[in-house]
Image (tube, rainbow, N blue to C red):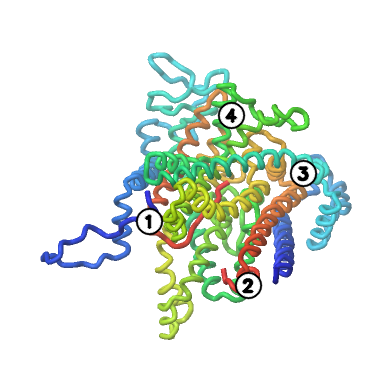
Amino acid sequence: MPPAEAMPTGEPQLPVGDQVEIVGKSPWYLAYMRLRRNKVALAFGVLFIVIVLACLAAPLWANYVAHTGPNENHLTEKINIGGKETFVVAPTGIPIGPGLHAKFLLGADDNGRDVMVRLLYGGRTSIYIGVMAAFITTFFAVAVGLAAGYWGGWTDSVLSRTMDIIWAFPVLLLGIALGTALSVGGLQIGPLSVPADSLWIPILIIGFVYVPYMARPIRGEVLALREKEFVEAAVAQGKGPIRIMFTELLPNLISTIIVFFTLNIANNMLLEAALSFLGAGVKPPNSSWGTMIADGEDRLVTAPHLTLVPGLMIVLTVLALNVFGDGLRDALNPRAKLRMEAN
Amino acid sequence: MEGMGRFIIRRLVGMIAVLFAISVLVFLIFNVIPNSDPALRIGGKNANQQLIDRINKDWGFNDPLPEQYVTLMKKTFSGDLVSYQNQRNVIDQIKKGIPVTFSLCIGAAIIWFLLGVVFGYLSAIRAGRATDRALTILALIGISLPVFWLGEMLLYYVANKAGLFPVGDYVKFSEDPLQWANHLILPWFTLAVLYIGFYSRLLRSNMLDVMDEDYVRTARAKGLPERQVRLKHVLRNSLIPIITLFGLDFGAVIGGGAILTETVYNLPGVGLYAGQSVASLDLPPLIAVTIFGAFFIVLLNTIVDIVYAYLDPRIRLGTQAA
């Protein structure tokens, strides 16, 4: 696939002299047409939506198919597999693996809990954290990027140096330091208090650590936009800086923001999994795909499905977002280049 | 060169300022947490109030925060820093971990750079064809894999089931170079996969940009063989941003990016030490490891900047805004 600039952007040429009304095509329409041609990206976009819907439908599966909740133990029970009564968790401590049975479709874990049900509920947590953290990162990165890029001077110096400090911090180390610290007593910002086992702790941490990775390229883009004639015109009309940021600069940043946002969700999900794996992310009673992998670690040899299954779900979801985000980038062709590090 | 000396000094001062800010930040993060009273940690479970009071006095935990910070930093740089958890010397522990972390990171860096360049090059010269598509998919899968999960899967399927490699652990290079490498092959690969994906994709897009440049057309027009155009003109010019990134990433990996790989494979490096200290909320090792990590990140950032400034006078004279 050639880069987007080299791709023919024109639609089929209308025959000259035909009685067809010529309608101008907006950049958004052109981007949409480019995206529509990219079948692979679309397929992965659909895959992501399917995964989200499946996780949203978790209670349906739990109530009508598996008849068990995500935290219900069946340690001492037996189920009928192929006419044979089998222990859900064998006396040796080894749980049953995946098989074609409505209950325990993907096997059971150490405590005799249904892995399929847990997978769907865990996915809700993982995706929720990924999306919410992406909103936080995007909000702050855009605010910082606009302020630093537009005002320049000391505003830029202060913001950029602060970003440099966060940037120089090893991401994972910062994440686990904050995660462990906050998991003891929760977080208290003024009137706002977040309990220690809340999902908002990992959300805030993940949202926070990625801000510089997104703010830097946005600032760069604002620096370039600031010199454009339309900004000059707006200044001449007497528009204030805040209004210029919202009405002149922000609309020009939208395509970049959309692409960053999509790829950011993918990175957030990977970081959440890593933090949860190290015990500094999602706390019980909540569970995510990351905590499921961590729980399965001890049973890697005797029950590999406990690690394999949630890991595959992370890979599928993150891959779907990456491929779709890539397609979006080709279609929207934002000027700034983004590269984020997960772990 | 004009202004070069001043530029380097400015960057070094900036580097020290950033490291200072980071050490203060870690110190604050761990001092505002409730329930992490270090005296309880040192005294153990059965400590009575008297013992706690004495520890607080001896270790200076009742001092004002700035004073505590200064004491901590003094100990860090004189090498007397000890863990609150088990009272082992922190600097010694880090020194023990350094050879392991460097063995892991340098090996992985070589693998990811070479494979990233080879895959990116192949992908670019076959752009749009089957090879390119296959490599693009592989690269995207590579950047979508959770590192620790990949490690566990390799441990189970390649090391445990197929028995091709040893299951984790580290052997010193000085003891047995072959076993050293044998134990590190899976960790190297695990750590490298993400970056192979990044680099091959970046190189591919850089090469495609460069291929449109006039000087490439000129090179072709004057009759240079295609191979030479690709290697000498296209690849060479596309590699510059990759090498910059390589510097930054190498710093990041040494400075904490290897925690997951070290944890999964049970490699006793600096990262594993950091992970264990975090779990026990042990401040001294965390401060030291974070400064250690940030030092490498900032150092390589600075080196990259200086090399760039050497190549581009606009940067060192401060005439370029970005």
Quarter of the picture holding the N terminus of chain B: bottom right
Whether label 4 touches label 3, CB < 8 Å: no
The tag earlier along the polypeptide, 2 or 4, is: 4
Residue A261 seen: no
Callout 4: few (<14), some (14-19), or many (20+) C-alpha neighbours within 10 Å?
many
- In front: label 1 or label 4: 1
Question: Are tags 1 and 4 found on a single chain?
Answer: no
Query: CA separation, marks 1 and 4?
Result: 40 Å
Mark seen at residue A4: 1
**Circle 2 chain:** B
Q: Secondary structure at mark 1?
A: helix
Relative side of A205 to B292, left or right: left
Callout 3: few (<14), some (14-19), or many (20+) C-alpha neighbours within 10 Å?
many
Q: Secondary structure at mark 4?
A: helix
**Image point 51% across, 44% down: which residue?**
B197
Relative side of A260 to B84, left or right: left
Q: Amino acid at mark 1?
A: Ala
**Outermost left residue:** A19
The location of residue A92, given as percent across then percent down, is 57, 18
The location of residue A285, given as percent across then percent down, is 54, 41
| Residue for badge 3 | B94
Q: Amino acid at mark 3?
A: Ile
Relative side of B301 to B283, left or right: left
Query: CA separation, marks 2 and 1?
Result: 33 Å
Query: CA separation, marks 2 and 4?
Result: 50 Å
The location of residue A219, given as percent across then percent down, is 52, 67
Relative side of A43 to B7, left or right: left
Query: CA separation, marks 3 and 1?
Result: 48 Å
**Circle 1 chain:** A
| Residue for badge 4 | B155
**Circle 3 chain:** B
Question: Are tags 2 and 4 found on a single chain?
Answer: yes
